[in-house]
Amino acid sequence: MITVHNLTKTYGQQTVLNIEGLEIPKGQSFGLVGNNGAGKTTLFSLLLDLIQPSSGHIVNNDVQVDQSEAWKPFTSAFIDESFLIGYLTPEEYFYFIGELRGRNKADVDALLSNYTDFFHDEILGQKKYLRDLSKGNQKKVGIVASFIGNPDVVILDEPFANLDPTTQIRLKGIIKDLAAKEEVTVLVSSHDLIHVTEVCERIVVLNKGEIVRDIHTSTETLKELETFFGG
Amino acid sequence: MLKHFIGLQWKSFYRSASFKTEIWFKILMGLGALYFILVFLGMGVGSFYIIEKSGLGDPLRVVNRFMIYYLAFDLVFRYMLQKMPVTNIKPLLYLPFKKSQVVNYSLGKTIISFFNIAHAFFFIPFSVVLLIEGYAPIQVIGWHLGLMALFYCNNFINIMVNNKDGVFYVFAALFILAGASQYYQWFDITIYTQPVFDFLYDLPWTAIVPWLILVSLYFSAFAYFKKHMFLDGGLAKKQSEAKTENLEWLDRFGNLGTFLKNDIKLIKRNKRSRTAVIMGFFFIFYGLLFFTSAIEVYDGPFWKIFAGIFVTGGFLFSFGQYVPSWDSSYYPLMMSQNIKYREYLSSKWYLVIIATIISTILASFYLYFGWEAYAAVLVGAIYNIGINSYLVLWGGAYVKTPIELTSNKKAFGDKQAFNAKTLLLTLPKLALPIGIYAIGHFLINPVAGYLFVAIFGLLGFAFKEKVFTMIEGIYKKEKYKTLQAYKQK
């Protein structure tokens, strides 16, 4: 599904990302972990063509992302609050995304009804604009909006941060369900080793822009990661 | 303690983004500031003699007569632009400062704000001239100090009524009503207010009254502020109740409708964009300066075209100029969602076109000044639609200034929005149509001049697809730089 070829990103003298090769097959749930500045968000931004690679490129389902826009219909993401439109209500925002992805109101409503628990009555019908919601609630909106329109690739940057414990647990369930679908490739980055080992089949560790571990998740994975980051 | 406050203030001043512009622009800004200072000084010095010459009577009395309007205008102006100094308070709240110190500091800061200092440029020279012209020194000083206190009263009144839109609109309406009724000689408010200001001169000791008012206003502002200095009180961001709007009538336009819906909400729900649209609306009346022969310089034939461009292009210039910056806070979303650049651009283009057409219809009252006036408006509209609409979109690709939608800061121009490329693009927007008109006007006749400009506009319209492909290419090329620039708030 996603192939990374000799990808580097440098700012001035500093190389923030340097990945020789990485292949993410279709349907995989892929976890990205690393300390601050390891290059997680940089990689995701490159995947979404929000920044330009210094060298190399990424191919998403046969589309080279920095050459063509054809990856947009089947890829969706929530990176940070710059993916939200502050002056819309959550409903308007969902419908807006829905319209962009060719889903009508009824489709969007049907999808949203699956997330009543996740929203915990704090999102829909609140008479609030997105900019006035709390950080956690904004995040819920962004995450759910990225599921609209059955995308093949879902990219979530730090989805667990800022969420309350109940919501974190529910989100894990949601991501697991999503990953269980054969055709959906989920990319998640996180600082929380426990969460990420729970929801991802494969975990890649980035350190200073380079891949230092590429693990197929098993019962020992959490220990291995803890030793890596602890040591 | 004060040392810390002043240190913070100084840092926020010289580290602000506006200081990080190019050197030539700093020089230009300096020259601009100098120009305005000189204009105000000239007004202060000159107004005495101008009023004296025009035979309206004693200049001091004339100034006193219209002082009520000056004060009212000042208040309205402040309400719209002067921000409450709360932004930097939050990080100070939990530090070992006394609350009253923080409040005093914030209120004190407003005293040296531009909105107060600006008046000094008029009043100090005016008072000096009064002294030179032989008005009694004690009385002039009394008058001067009294008025100074009144302007500072405005300062604190504004702090207390901040964000009370209801009060503001009532006041602004009264102000306009008073002005209108004076103009049509129904009712002259100045008959009742002039004596108040005259008192300050005739009996200089009365100047103490405005000072007493000022002191009491300071203390009430202090008390008000202190009482509300909590995160969920006065420091909270104002939240308005949100209503979900469907605007389903736009659905028939497909993807274009989706964007138009969003743009309408953008304009309705954000202070900054509302201001831009209101400013654009007032451009419609700009032509009055030209067509009423109010200003002689504007009587030349080219100015009519100039006026036509501005009358119908208000929205184009005030809103269109900042495309795509209106979407700066969620530009990454727009760039990674299932959106084609061309659709995005053409929705903005249609918005500009629709607004231009509406302005043209609204401007039909220019027919009153003869068909030629309205012909200039129509021709201006055609040129705006055919040429200028592309040029603003094109220029927008280079603007790259993030816009903070919820505040009116920088609503009246942003220096970062000026760079060599956008300045160059202004030329064809204004100078080119005037040039084309001049050719027709001098070679054949004025009608031919109008026709030439209109044909030019229509030609531009015909090449829409081609031009859009070009603009799209530029936007794509600038995409990464734009994304990067919008990140830096």
Image: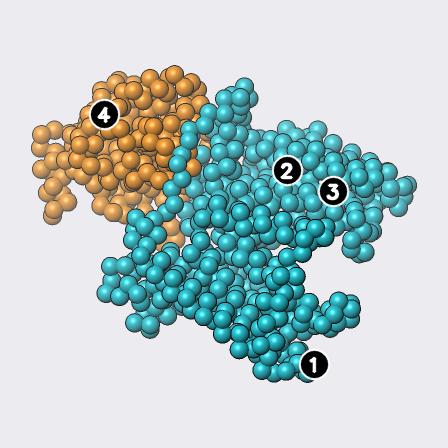
Question: CA separation, marks 1 and 3?
Answer: 46 Å
Q: Nearer the viewer, mark 2 or mark 4?
A: 4
Q: What residue does disc 3 label?
A: B308
Q: Nearer the viewer, mark 1 or mark 2?
A: 1
* Mark 1 or 2, nearer chain start: 1
Near mark 4 (Cα within 10 A), the count class, few <14, some 14-19 or many ≥20, is few
State whether discs 1 and 3 lie on one chain. yes
**Local secondary structure at mark 1:** loop
Q: What residue does disc 2 label?
A: B390
Near mark 1 (Cα within 10 A), the count class, few <14, some 14-19 or many ≥20, is few
Give the percent coordinates (x, y) of residue B175: 59, 52
Question: CA separation, marks 1 and 4?
Answer: 80 Å
Amino acid residing under circle 4: Asp
Q: Residue at x 78, y 34 (%)?
A: B455
Question: CA separation, marks 3 and 4?
Answer: 58 Å
Q: What residue does disc 1 label?
A: B133
Q: How many marks?
A: 4
